[in-house]
Image: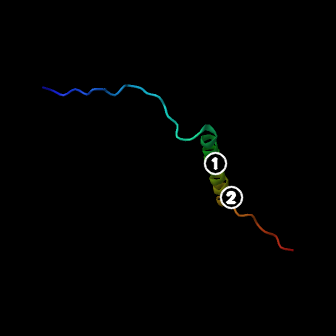
Amino acid sequence: MASQPIDPPSAGGDLIYRQRRPVRAWHWLNALAVVVLLMSGMMIFSAPPKAVVLT
């Protein structure tokens, strides 16, 4: 006799968020800020040197 699961898993389900919406929005805002800061830092790092004129 083969055993059958009593409650087979469904194809879909409800999506459960662990954090509230403002926390998730703050996380993505911070992630975007980190990317912007990294890109601007790479632009500063790769800028050609400028001649400094001392008078």
In the drawing, does residue 33 fall left or right of residue 16? Answer: right
Badge 1 amino acid: Asn
* Above or below, comparing residue 21 to residue 39 in the picture: above
Q: Quadrant of residue 28?
A: top right
* Above or below, comparing residue 6 to residue 26 in the picture: above
Residue 5 drawn at (x, y percent): 25, 28
Q: Residues within 10 Å of mark 2 (few under 14, many from 20)?
A: few
The residue sitting at the left extreme is: 1
Q: Residues within 10 Å of mark 1 (few under 14, many from 20)?
A: few
How many numbered badges does the structure rendering display?
Answer: 2
Residue 49 drawn at (x, y percent): 71, 64
Nearer to the camera, 45 or 11 = 11
Q: Residue at x 38, y 25 (%)?
A: 11
Nearer to the camera, 49 or 33 = 33
Q: Residue at x 78, y 69 (%)?
A: 52
Badge 2 amino acid: Ile
Instruction: Name the residue beneath numbered marker 2.
Output: 44
In the drawing, does residue 35 fall left or right of residue 1? Answer: right
Residue 33 drawn at (x, y percent): 65, 49
Which of labels 1 and 2 is toward the front?
A: 1
